[in-house]
Amino acid sequence: MKVRLATVWLGGCSGCHMSFLDLDEFLLELVDQVELVYSPVVDVKEYPENVDVCLIEGAVCNTDNLEILHRIRRHTKVLVAFGDCAVTANVPAIRNQLGLGNAESVLQHAYIEHAQNNPRVPRADGIVPPLLPRVLPVHQVVPVEYFLPGCPPPAGQIKTVVTQLLAGAAPQLAGAELKFG
């Protein structure tokens, strides 16, 4: 039986998924071992039940992120915070330090004060989900089994962690696997 694998992209740049795609030939090997049940690279709209492993990229920035993250945790055995935004909130959390006050002032700053054309905050449903008061790393919202840091994590480290997880082992990076570049 194949491992049910998901990858998720919350608030971030998608660089971790780009690094995942840099696994190149290993992706072909992975196809034989996993069933990719949810990911930005597949057309599945609803996060499924009974997911074995989920690599989750990005920080928790808005109510949509919060909602899907709770669903992911309920339906996933092993959750991996995938990349620095998921591990520490990284770049998305800069808004926590801007001194802009609440989430509404962040929207005003981005969409009104710095607009070059048509300054207005989008208000239609589904366009901009309500922002959380603070951007959070994944582990501050739900329990996380493993952390894979890096901005983005290099493909070699992703391969090592995924290979260990598929073998039923607790992922460990050591020696040359920790070197970037």
Image (tube, rainbow, N blue to C red):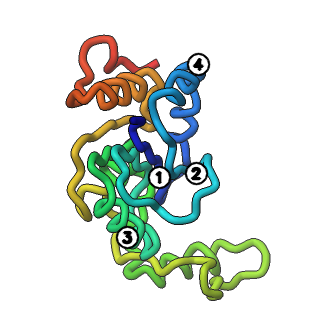
Q: Nearer the viewer, mark 3 or mark 2?
A: 2
73 lies above or below 57: below
Q: Is residue 98 left or right of residue 124?
A: left
Residue 9 locus on image (x, y percent): 49, 53
Q: Residues within 10 Å of mark 1 (few under 14, many from 20)?
A: many
Q: Mark 1 points at which residue?
A: 8
**For marks 3 and 4 on the same chain, the one whose residue lies earlier in the sequence:** 4
**For marks 2 and 4 on the same chain, the one whose residue lies earlier in the sequence:** 4
9 lies above or below 148: below
Amino acid bearing label 3: Leu
| Residue drawn 56% across the image and 81% down it | 108
Task: Report the Cα–Cα distance between label 2 and label 4.
Answer: 19 Å
Q: Nearer the viewer, mark 3 or mark 4?
A: 4
Mark 2 vs 4: CB contact within 8 A: no
Q: Name the residue under label 4.
A: 25
Amino acid bearing label 1: Val
Residue 119 locus on image (x, y percent): 71, 82
Amino acid bearing label 2: Pro
Task: Report the Cα–Cα distance between label 3 and label 4.
Answer: 34 Å
Q: Name the residue under label 2.
A: 40
Amino acid bearing label 4: Glu
Q: Nearer the viewer, residue 54 or 1?
A: 1
Name which quarter of the figure residue 135 lies in. bottom left
Q: Is residue 51 left or right of residue 106?
A: left
**For marks 1 and 2 on the same chain, the one whose residue lies earlier in the sequence:** 1
Q: Mark 3 points at which residue?
A: 66
Q: Is label 2 in a helix, a strand or a loop?
A: loop
